[in-house]
């Protein structure tokens, strides 16, 4: 790397690292997220493993310098592939001292965490601000953090009039020195981001970048040396919601009907911007119910349709979900979960809609539920979901969450395949002998007539109906039709393989997870196994039907434990006992399905579970198993 | 072609549709129900327009009126209470080749489906929306609907309803992009037919409120209008609903109303002294959302794959 040859680097202390966690924290609107994203992307380009996650306040612009108002990014970068946001931050860039407290509350820092803190507050005209700053710096030091007071604003003002609009690029320069990032790559990224703003703005930002870099060169006597591996394969880097949107395009989905809801909306933002490239259309409906109804109508007319929502929207859609099930309409419902119930934690991480999805309808309403566990899977599962919906003639739910939605990760560039696209609209004549619900008695599967197909005319109804879609006035019809819809779940189940076991196929403790927790769980398992524990893990992608072969797997372990981000009672906390406790959602399902005594460790902190927290839980549960 | 007479050329016989081609299941509405009249008018319209049954879709919600699709031999979608309109919009969105009809009622459209009513009017996608307004919830047995008259005894207001009814016409006229607003009655088949025919040819969403008798629960409501046709106000105009002289003579109480005159439409709809029938308002130039929802229709697989590749390039590292 070019900078390495500079004499400045040679005089500095080189600190070798395998991985690091960097956080950039600011008030809203100061551009910390942009800086974090660029830092993550160029690190990925340079060959590091990267996981970036946004730190998002609930409001667009909360009051400045407020403890809950943190906006920014956490970037975990390392020489190996990164699957989660990790544990405690190594380096923090703080635009003010107050926003760091929300991170301290989340236990994101450790003694030794280096904080590069904007120092202008020490000279603020308002004495209360000066005082708060001084107090915080003293407190940070007491907590064992290493504080570097950095005159970001005054340095930026050498290049721009409004430092609030430039500080982010300046700190990017600082980080570039610290981690020897490729400045040319950063400049390219800045150019891409600011292309529309004109050359003058771009050059100003180059200047800010260099200024930050130079300041660090001058004032820091150390730098980090993180090995970068050469990549052999083409990669893309994006967040989970972008991956879902691109997946929808790859799947040949034609209509996305949605209503804005955090944290799902950005899926439709990406689609709104690019769906036209593949001939698709995004309909922003008047409400969640109408969005679902519109998608159902489009599906009925033979078009591949999806809707995208989050927990509260799922609740509103439930009646129509039942309609899609009984009408056997293919449809993809994406639920980017957030904290619940009610409005809950709108911008925060939770995976607590599993049971709501499973039982999201009165009556018996079987539907397929899948959950991607990585950002790459967000892309590919959209294709899977679309195909399953059509083959099984039923709605397919795809459960993502805010962790995947905002996490950014590089992955192998998908090679689009025509087979991923939906088939063309069938308008050939229908065989009038074939009923609109011509259920195969074994599989429950049937073909559906599409409007436009001659002799296929039928009335789809939400009423219980027979094969000919005639309203069920005889008592036996409903039993049979229910069985046929249920049969499809068995048909799918029989085509699935048992989950792969991460670790040995037998041992003391088996951890079971689903969704976005996979990376953190497997990292925790790795650490425990390195310490000699007999721990393995499985991660379920199919939640309905549940993947086969679970019971035999469970029986080869002394204990089975789910790790989930949804609420469960903690035994011995207050009046909670093994008998009266309420279990986490997957645990409840697995207990019912396998009759095994599945335990659970689950928390709802409004953020992802860290590998360290999971590791700690595993070691607690390993105690008393006798090894 | 040289030397060949036109009538020697092979031409597959065009399909000719008769009324029976549109007859589905035997209606289970009560004897004397106004819905039968609407069914007859609609089947006649389909026959007269020679609509291909396979290219025609009837979408409905829940209620007596929403059984309608079962009694047609076309494609049909008997959906959920209040949701006929967004489902129909979804059907319409990518299928400009289909004829879309909606049958809904005063409870379905003006109560549980209110949000969709307003927004479907605004979307103005081409479809015929028939509201069977019998002033009551019939299928669930005599509960107050938004159009139930004040003081009417129902099972939910046994001592009489408290409030005056909602006026669906003024509400509809108030939605900026409403483009076809008509009112007719089930007991005048010629007027009903003429209204539906005009609605079918309207380029956009046509809103047709059909005053419909419920022999069980609101038999008395429309009786005065039937017994004394002068209580009905017939709107006439060369751009309005055209009816033959006999009908025009029955409804002798008439007003010339130009359907482009929104203000007068409001005035007529607001005056509750008479029951106005005819075309309140029509604007054939109103914005249509279905001209946008078809964007990208017919992309080839190659185009889709190319589009996806270019999108992946944006995220490439």
Image (tube, rainbow, N blue to C red):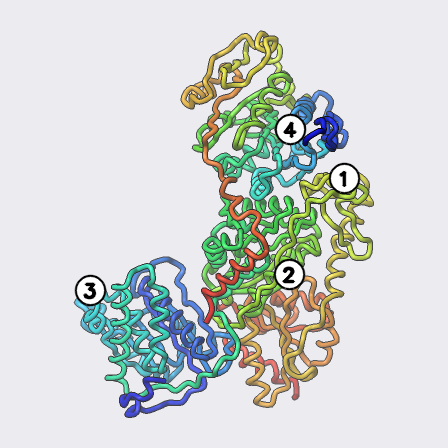
Quadrant in the picture for residue A173: bottom left
Evaluate whether residue A579 shows in this view.
yes
Residue A511 or residue B186, whichever sits in front: B186
Chain-order first, disc 2 or disc 3: 3
**Disc 2 to disc 3, C-alpha distance:** 54 Å
Chain-order first, disc 3 or disc 1: 3
Answer few, some or many: residues within 10 Å of disc 2's Cα (few below 14, many 20 plus, some between 14 and 19). Answer: few
Give the label on residue A419, or none. Answer: 2
Q: Nearer the viewer, mark 2 or mark 4?
A: 2
Q: Chain of mark 1?
A: A
Q: Chain of mark 3?
A: A
Q: Residue at x 27, y 83 (%)?
A: A217
Residue B2 or residue A339, whichever sits in front: B2
Element type at marker 2? helix
Give the label on residue A161, or none. Answer: 3
Give the label on residue A470, or none. Answer: 1
Answer few, some or many: residues within 10 Å of disc 4's Cα (few below 14, many 20 plus, some between 14 and 19). Answer: some
**Disc 2 to disc 4, C-alpha distance:** 54 Å
Evaluate whether residue A121 shows in this view.
no
Answer few, some or many: residues within 10 Å of disc 1's Cα (few below 14, many 20 plus, some between 14 and 19). Answer: some
């Amino acid at each position: 790397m070019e900078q390495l040859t500079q004499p400045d680097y040679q005089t500095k202390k080189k600190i070798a690292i395998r991985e690091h966690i960097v956080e950039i924290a600011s008030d809203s609107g100061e551009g910390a997220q942009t800086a974090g994203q660029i830092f993550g992307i160029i690190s990925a380009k340079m060959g590091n493993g990267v996981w970036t996650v946004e730190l998002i306040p609930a409001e667009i612009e909360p009051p400045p310098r407020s403890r809950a108002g943190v906006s920014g990014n956490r970037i975990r970068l390392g020489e190996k592939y990164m699957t989660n946001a990790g544990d405690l931050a190594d380096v923090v860039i703080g635009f003010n001292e107050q926003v760091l407290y929300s991170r301290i509350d989340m236990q994101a820092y450790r003694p030794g965490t280096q904080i590069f803190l904007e120092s202008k507050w020490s000279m603020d005209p308002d004495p209360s601000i000066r005082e708060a700053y001084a107090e915080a710096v003293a407190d940070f030091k007491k907590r064992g953090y290493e504080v570097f007071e950095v005159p970001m604003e005054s340095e930026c003002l050498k290049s721009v009039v409004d430092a609030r609009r430039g500080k982010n690029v300046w700190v990017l320069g600082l980080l570039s020195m610290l981690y020897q990032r490729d400045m040319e790559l950063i400049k390219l990224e800045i150019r891409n981001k600011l292309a529309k703003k004109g050359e003058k703005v771009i050059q100003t930002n180059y200047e800010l970048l260099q200024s930050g870099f130079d300041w660090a060169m001058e004032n820091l006597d150390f730098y980090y040396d993180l090995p970068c591996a050469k990549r052999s394969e083409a990669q893309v880097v994006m967040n989970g919601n972008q991956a879902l949107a691109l997946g929808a395009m790859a799947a040949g989905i034609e209509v996305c009907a949605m209503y804005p809801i955090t944290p799902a909306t950005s899926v439709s933002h990406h689609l709104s911007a690019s769906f036209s490239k593949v001939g698709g259309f995004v309909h922003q409906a008047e409400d969640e119910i109408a969005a679902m109804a519109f998608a159902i109508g489009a599906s009925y007319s033979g078009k591949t349709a999806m809707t995208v929502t989050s927990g509260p929207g799922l609740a509103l859609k439930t009646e129509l979900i039942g309609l899609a099930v009984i009408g056997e309409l293919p449809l993809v419902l994406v639920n980017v979960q957030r904290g619940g119930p009610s409005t809950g934690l709108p911008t925060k991480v939770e995976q607590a809609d599993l049971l709501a999805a499973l039982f999201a309808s009165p009556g018996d309403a079987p539907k397929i539920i899948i959950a991607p566990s990585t950002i790459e899977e967000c892309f590919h599962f959209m294709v899977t979901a679309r195909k399953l919906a059509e083959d099984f003639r039923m709605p397919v739910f795809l459960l993502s969450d805010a962790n995947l939605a905002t996490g950014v990760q590089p992955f192998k560039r998908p090679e689009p395949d025509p087979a991923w696209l939906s088939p063309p609209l069938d308008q050939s004549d229908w065989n009038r002998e074939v009923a609109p619900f011509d259920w195969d008695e074994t599989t429950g599967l049937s073909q559906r007539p599409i409007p436009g197909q001659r002799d296929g005319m039928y009335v789809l109804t939400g009423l219980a109906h027979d094969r000919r879609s005639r309203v069920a006035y005889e008592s036996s019809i409903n039993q049979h039709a229910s069985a046929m819809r249920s049969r499809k779940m068995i048909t799918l189940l029989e085509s699935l393989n048992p989950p792969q076991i991460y670790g040995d196929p037998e041992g003391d403790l088996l951890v079971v997870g689903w969704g976005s927790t996979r990376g953190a769980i497997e990292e925790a398992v790795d650490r425990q196994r390195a310490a000699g524990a007999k721990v393995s893990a499985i991660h379920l992608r199919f939640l309905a039907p549940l993947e086969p072969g679970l019971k035999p797997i469970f029986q080869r372990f002394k204990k089975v434990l789910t790790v989930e981000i949804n609420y469960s009672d903690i035994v011995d906390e207050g009046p909670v006992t093994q008998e009266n406790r309420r279990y986490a959602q997957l645990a409840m399902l697995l207990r019912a399905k396998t009759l095994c005594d599945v335990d659970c460790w689950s928390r709802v902190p409004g953020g992802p579970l860290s590998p360290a927290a999971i590791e700690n839980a595993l070691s607690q549960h390993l105690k008393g198993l006798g090894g | 072609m040289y030397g060949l007479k036109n009538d020697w050329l092979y031409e597959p016989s065009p399909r000719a549709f008769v009324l029976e081609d549109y007859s589905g299941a035997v209606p289970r509405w009560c004897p004397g129900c106004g819905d039968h009249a609407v069914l007859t008018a609609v089947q006649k319209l389909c026959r007269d327009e020679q609509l291909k049954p396979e290219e025609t879709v009837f979408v409905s919600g829940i209620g007596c009126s929403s059984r309608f699709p079962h009694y047609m031999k076309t494609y049909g979608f008997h959906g959920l209470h209040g949701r006929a309109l967004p489902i129909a919009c979804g059907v319409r969105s990518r299928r400009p080749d289909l004829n879309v009809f909606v049958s809904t009622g005063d409870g379905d459209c003006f109560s549980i489906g209110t949000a969709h009513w307003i927004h479907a009017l605004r979307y103005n996608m081409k479809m015929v929306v028939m509201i069977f307004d019998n002033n009551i919830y019939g299928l669930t047995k005599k509960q107050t609907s938004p159009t139930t008259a004040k003081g009417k005894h129902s099972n939910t207001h046994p001592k009489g309803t408290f409030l005056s009814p909602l006026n669906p016409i003024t509400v509809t006229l108030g939605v900026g992009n409403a483009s076809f607003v008509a009112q007719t009655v089930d007991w005048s088949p010629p007027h009903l037919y003429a209204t539906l025919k005009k609605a079918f040819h309207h380029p956009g969403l046509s809103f047709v409120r059909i005053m419909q008798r419920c022999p069980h629960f609101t038999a008395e409501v429309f009786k005065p209008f039937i017994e004394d046709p002068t209580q009905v106000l017939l709107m006439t105009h060369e751009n309005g609903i055209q009816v033959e002289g006999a009908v025009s003579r029955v409804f002798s109480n008439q007003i010339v109303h130009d359907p482009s005159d929104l203000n007068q439409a409001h005035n007529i709809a607001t005056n509750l002294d008479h029951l106005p029938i005819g075309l309140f308002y029509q604007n054939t130039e109103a914005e249509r959302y279905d001209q946008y929802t078809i964007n990208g229709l017919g992309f080839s697989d190659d185009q889709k794959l190319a589009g996806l590749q270019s999108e992946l390039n944006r995220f490439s590292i």
